[in-house]
Amino acid sequence: MSDLNIEKLLNIYNYFDGIMVTDEKGVIKYYTNFRTDVYSLQVDCIVGKTILEIHPDLTEETSTIMQVLKTGQPIYDRVEHLTTAHGDCITNICSTLPIMQGGKIVGTIDFSRSIDDGQNRNIQRRYINLPKLHSQKENLYHLDDIVTSSQKINEIKKQIPMIANTDSAVMIYGETGTGKEMIAQSIHTSGVRCGYNFVSQNCAAIPANLLESILFGTVKGSFTGAEDKAGLFELANGGTLFLDEINSMEMSMQAKILKAIEEKQVRRIGGERPIAFDVKVISAVNKNPMDCIQEGLLRQDLFYRLSTVLIEVPALRNRLVDIPVMTNYFINQFNRKMNKDVVGVTNEVMELFCQYTWPGNVRELKNVIEGSFNVISSREISVENLPSYLTSRFEEEKDRMVNYVGSLSLTEKVEEYEKRLIQWALDSTKNASLAAEKLKISKQALNYKLLKYGLRERKK
């Protein structure tokens, strides 16, 4: 993480007294302290040393930095009583987050706020959701990173280079875990804006009163503690701004977003001067946008403004052909990361994967594979290596399906199975002729069955 990115973070968040960045061994690489009145150590006394050297009373078990380096899990708002080698005593509230690169922990970033002992009992837990700031030099997803055998996803891949080289707004909708941000990043890296920042913000992760200042920026003195800060529209200037879960944003905030996008300028909170920006706006919703409009979660005018290009990402259960592909992809990925030699999954596991509904989609599949790597003792992932919630839920779903099928006649059961096979063939081929060939039936017979079951061939 560069000093430039540190400054960007400091320009967004101002309610911390100190910030510290370490490498993967806990060696401090960056340090800023705003409370020299209570903590006198200077930067040259800290940078280059480990946190345990600075605070001898800390251990690997009690230090948030060392714990995050060990577990990879962020720690929020932990109270630490610290004594320096120089004898300074201080009580901090610390929040420490891992810095990841290529799936590995390469360091931590630690925010601290100085308090006195009388305040400890009144601490309110505060979750920190930092916007992600990516430049062209950092690891973003590219078009080739989208691995699929699904005809629908391949259609999206073909569209991305064309979408990427226009200034038109893009809206992506799909369930949580389907890979919406991967598509957003691929649009950015495939176009002329790839040399500028890709800025990502989850709109559901920030309270409304804070989200406005994050998006538009602030002017010093506009409210207590406010500083001159650039908003995300300014930070993304020339590049791409990705607003995830925009349907979780309050309606009043949506109106302000609409105005900013239409005018292509923002005014910082407390500011008088409009600031022009040039960004490609990509938004995402986790459910059908028309349902969001009807339920009062998304302004209709904002939808029309943001959905110049509308991309639907199908759920994993609706593209079964991708399950074996993604399974092998994640196995290869974790083989490299964990230095293992897993060759695949058993037939029983693959059958379970293809029948499970995957409510968490691709993200859930990835997590299941990673979890299996932690407990596997052979070269194939077996049912015993899977989390119990998945196998138990699968059994429940199978029981429900048995009860459902049990209420059907033999003809209805055959038709239900036939319909699933046809849908699979359509999704895994380029056209109806190839689907008919895969099913070993004539094109005319397939057309009849498409009409019978209300299915249709996707137009290319």
Image (cartoon, helix red, strand yellow):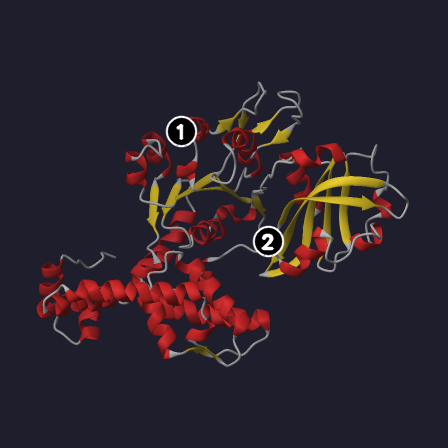
Residue at mark 1: 251
Q: Tag on residue 91?
A: none
Disc 1, SS: helix
Image location (x, y in percent) of residue 53: 84, 54
Image location (x, y in percent) of residue 264: 47, 29
Disc 2, SS: loop
The foreground one among 447 and 109 is: 109
In the image, taking residue 193 as reference, residue 397 lies left or right, namely left
In the image, taking residue 355 as reference, residue 91 lies left or right, namely right
User: At x 36% / y 32%, what residue is drawn?
Assistant: 302
Q: CA distance from mark 1 to mark 2?
A: 34 Å
The foreground one among 182 and 383 is: 383
The foreground one among 206 and 230 is: 206
Residue at mark 2: 138
> Can residue 220 be seen here?
yes
Label 2, residues with CA under 10 Å away: few <14, some 14-19, many ≥20: few
Instruction: Tell me, yes or no, whether the two marked residues, 1 and 2, touch with CB atoms within 8 Å.
Output: no
User: At x 36% / y 66%, what residue is drawn?
Assistant: 322
Label 1, residues with CA under 10 Å away: few <14, some 14-19, many ≥20: some
Q: Amino acid at mark 1?
A: Met
